[in-house]
Image (spheres, rainbow, N blue to C red):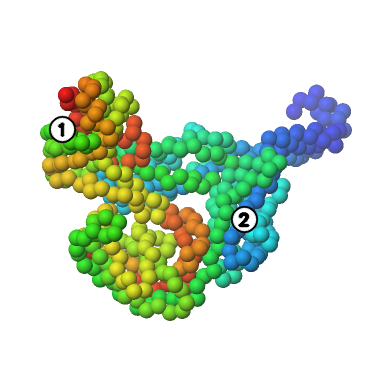
């Protein structure tokens, strides 16, 4: 009789679980990673108590099979490349066709760095080639080291400025040492406040993703190790 | 325990304490089974909003925006981030509201799990301008309406909207022709699209392009409704536009 009672409870418990599994769907999740033409890249999928790693095939494609309906994070890596993320992907499942996540581009990080960043500000009212009224100009100088052809400048009113915590972002290049701020940039930088700026070497081909603490868009091609000093000025 | 109950236990070949042990084991099994169900019937959502004040400046503190979804709700933190859990799975409407601000909403599928679904939509909440128009002169030149007047505040920021119809019940959702300032918008990385100067120091003079207005006036009775909004309004006219001047017949 003891056995009979256990069987009854087990049946109830399994029945309860089984009903849930009946309502859940299964399916496959696929995607593609673009890079330098060489594979593999590593793809880590996490969610629903799973943590699975796979690699891309010769065409950069990857596939996760037998996934349960749920919400998943994906992380894309390879040594020497900027890491990419897809956060909170809603996977429905239940279809014979694999669901597809957005494609990801991996950028080979440049072997470069920036130092001795110095910034000053001049006030002028001119019109640039886009017919925007330029109100303030940031003049900058810096020393570049290594092989990078592209650099990114990040501005913030917070001294803790970085590529994950900024208010404005500009592409910069050697030989054109100014950043033009329009009258509407006073949205971000008010008169007599301190403006902080850093620069990074940058490879343009990488995807971007949101930083989950600040909401800032992170460009995966940024070479974090090559960051400059934080320069500052008082907004005129 | 009655003697009758004890007799039943013995007839089932179970001593009372064994019976209790079996019951507890059974209940644990049941709980485990049902626990699993709870994990797969709810999910979460996370994302970011941007709040812009009535002077078209980003709010330094973006907290206090209420986010509502399927009878669940939460508030944004100072960075504008929200995260809500225990939402029934399915497709729901997310609503974003704050007093004095134009609300926003979107639809999102919530899938189960501890990881919240990331809402990719960039949500903007712009504060409604509290300025009023205290004087207005409306004139026309070829395909343009010229609005000249005075605002109730010495400094304000606003975008103008004009709606034209041949009946006096003209409004933002009942019109034949419309016009407004140039577009302005902010991308997710804080760069922005075309911007027209929308700051005013008491007096204003605004040229609004309305294609076909000259011909329209020559053939119809013409009523004009004028609205203002935050320059970074979120394209939801019903939530964002403020009636700024009584409907005016211009011919």
Quick one: label 2, few (<14), some, or many (20+) residues within 10 Å? some
* Residue A71 relative to residue A225: left or right: right
Residue A231 shows up from this direction:
no
Q: For marks 2 and 1, give the one nearer the viewer.
A: 1
Q: Quadrant of residue A18?
A: top right
Letter of the chain that mark 2 sits on in the rendering: A
Task: Locate residue A94, reporting x and y percent.
Answer: 68, 39
* Residue B50 relative to residue B247: left or right: right
**Which residue position is annotated with label 1?**
B138
**Which residue position is annotated with label 2?**
A32
Q: Quadrant of residue A103?
A: bottom right
Q: Quadrant of residue B109?
A: top right
Q: CA distance from mark 2 to mark 1?
A: 57 Å
Task: Locate residue A188, reporting x and y percent.
Answer: 29, 56
Q: Quadrant of the C terminus of chain A?
A: bottom left
- What residue do we see at 55% from left, 40% from top? B110
- What residue do we see at 49% from left, 58% from top? A208
- What residue do we see at 30% from left, 65% from top? A179
* Residue A56 relative to residue A225: left or right: right
Task: Locate residue B44, reporting x and y percent.
Answer: 53, 43
Q: Secondary structure at mark 1?
A: strand
Q: Secondary structure at mark 2?
A: strand
Foreground residue among A208 and B169: B169
Foreground residue among B1 and A88: A88
Quick one: label 1, few (<14), some, or many (20+) residues within 10 Å? some
Letter of the chain that mark 1 sits on in the rendering: B
Q: Are marks 2 and 1 on the same chain?
A: no
């Amino acid at each position: 009789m003891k056995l009979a009672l256990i069987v009854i409870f087990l049946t109830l418990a399994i029945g309860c679980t089984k009903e849930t599994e009946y309502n859940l769907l299964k399916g496959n999740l696929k995607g593609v990673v673009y890079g330098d033409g060489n594979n593999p890249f590593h793809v880590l999928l996490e969610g629903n108590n799973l943590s699975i790693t796979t690699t891309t095939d010769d065409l950069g494609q990857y596939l996760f099979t037998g996934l349960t309906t749920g919400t998943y994070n994906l992380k894309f890596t390879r040594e020497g490349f900027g890491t990419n993320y897809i956060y909170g992907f809603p996977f429905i499942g239940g279809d014979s066709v694999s669901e597809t996540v957005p494609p990801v581009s991996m950028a080979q990080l440049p072997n470069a760095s920036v130092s001795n960043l110095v910034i000053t500000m001049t006030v002028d009212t001119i019109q640039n080639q886009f017919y925007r009224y330029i109100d303030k100009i940031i003049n900058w100088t810096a020393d570049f080291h290594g092989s990078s052809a592209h650099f990114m400048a990040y501005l913030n009113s917070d001294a803790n400025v970085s590529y994950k915590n900024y208010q404005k972002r500009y592409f910069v290049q050697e030989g054109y040492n100014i950043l033009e701020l329009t009258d509407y940039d006073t949205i971000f930088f008010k008169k007599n406040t301190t403006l902080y700026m850093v620069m990074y070497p940058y490879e343009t081909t990488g995807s971007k993703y949101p930083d989950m603490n600040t909401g800032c868009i992170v460009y995966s091609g940024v070479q974090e190790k090559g960051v400059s000093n934080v320069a500052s000025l008082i907004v005129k | 325990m009655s003697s009758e109950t004890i007799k039943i236990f013995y007839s089932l070949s179970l001593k009372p304490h064994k019976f209790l042990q079996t019951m507890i084991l059974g209940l644990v099994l049941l709980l485990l089974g049902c626990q699993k169900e709870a994990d797969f019937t709810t999910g979460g959502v996370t994302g970011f909003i941007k709040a812009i004040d009535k002077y078209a400046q980003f709010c330094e503190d973006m907290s206090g925006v209420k986010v509502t979804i399927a009878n669940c709700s939460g508030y944004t933190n100072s960075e504008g981030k929200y995260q809500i859990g225990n939402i029934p799975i399915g497709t729901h409407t997310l609503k974003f509201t704050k007093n004095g601000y134009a609300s926003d909403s979107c639809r999102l599928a919530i899938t189960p799990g501890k990881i919240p679904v990331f809402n990719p939509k960039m949500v903007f909440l712009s504060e409604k301008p509290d300025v009023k128009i205290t004087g207005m002169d409306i004139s026309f030149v070829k395909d343009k309406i010229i609005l000249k007047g005075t605002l109730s505040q010495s400094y304000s920021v606003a975008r103008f909207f004009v709606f034209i119809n041949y009946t006096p019940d003209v409004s933002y959702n009942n019109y034949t022709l419309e016009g407004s300032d140039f577009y302005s918008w902010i991308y997710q990385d804080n760069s922005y699209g075309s911007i027209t100067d929308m700051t005013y120091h008491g007096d204003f003079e605004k040229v609004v392009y309305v294609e076909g207005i000259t011909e329209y006036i020559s053939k119809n009775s013409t009523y004009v409704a004028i609205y203002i909004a935050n320059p970074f309004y979120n394209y939801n006219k019903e939530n964002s536009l403020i009636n700024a001047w009584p409907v005016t017949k211009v011919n």
